[in-house]
């Protein structure tokens, strides 16, 4: 096993399709845990002295099974709760930008960029395949 560090947004941006094994527990974070993560993100984002924040490890293995897209699949062993929460936060941010017609904000961040870089996977012919979490979100929304 090899451990590497990466920025969370870069991890999402690599167009990986996350696969959650059936034996993983259901999403169980409460509002308290989500608020703590959000507070941490806001603290890091507003304090120029802080270069980053450790959100925890994500353990995965690359799948060697049949894939529905041309994107890499990762079988998530640990980190499902954090990945799901970060995806929900990105979705909420994207929706907020769209609903309030905010266009681009800091560093070119926009509804379209968040969706295309971090939430959706574009197939070769231009159709969109959502990652595991987005499919679940669509059912909820």
Image (cartoon, rainbow, N blue to C red):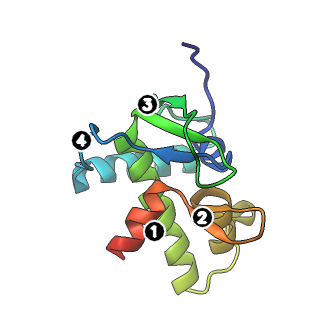
Residue at mark 2: 129
Residue 133 x %, y %: 44, 57
Q: What's the distance in space between the residues labelled 4 and 2, CA to CA?
A: 24 Å
Query: Which SS class for mark 1?
Result: helix
Considering only vertical position in the picture, is 86 above or below 57? Answer: below
Left of 82 or right of it: where is 53? right
Numbered circles on residues, count? 4
* Contact? badges 2 and 3 (CB < 8 Å): no
Query: Which SS class for mark 2?
Result: strand
Q: What's the distance in space between the residues labelled 2 and 3, CA to CA?
A: 27 Å
N-terminal of the pair, mark 3 or mark 4, is 4
N-terminal of the pair, mark 1 or mark 2, is 1
Task: Name which residue lies at 59% across and 64% down.
Answer: 129
Residue at mark 1: 92
Residue at mark 4: 25
Left of 113 or right of it: where is 3? left
Left of 14 or right of it: where is 12? left
Q: Nearer the viewer, residue 132 or 45?
A: 132
Query: Which-is-in-front pick, marks 1 and 4?
Result: 4
Q: Nearer the viewer, residue 41 or 86?
A: 86
N-terminal of the pair, mark 3 or mark 1, is 3
Query: Counting other residues with Cα less than 10 Å from the Cα at mark 3, is it few (<14), some (14-19), or many (20 or more)?
Result: few
Q: What's the distance in space between the residues labelled 3 and 4, CA to CA?
A: 18 Å
Res 116 → quadrant: bottom right
């Amino acid at each position: 096993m090899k451990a590497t560090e990466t920025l969370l947004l870069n991890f999402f941006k690599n167009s990986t399709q996350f696969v959650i094994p059936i034996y993983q527990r259901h999403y169980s974070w409460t509002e308290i845990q989500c608020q703590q993560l959000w507070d941490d993100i806001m603290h890091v984002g507003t304090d120029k002295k802080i270069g980053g924040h450790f959100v925890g490890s994500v353990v995965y293995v690359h799948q060697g099974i049949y894939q529905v897209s041309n994107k890499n699949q990762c079988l998530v062993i640990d980190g499902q709760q954090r990945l799901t929460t970060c995806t929900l936060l990105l979705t909420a941010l994207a929706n907020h930008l769209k609903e309030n017609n905010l266009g681009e904000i800091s560093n070119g961040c926009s509804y379209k960029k968040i969706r295309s870089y971090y939430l959706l996977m574009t197939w070769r012919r231009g159709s969109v395949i959502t990652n595991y979490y987005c499919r679940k979100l669509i059912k909820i929304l």
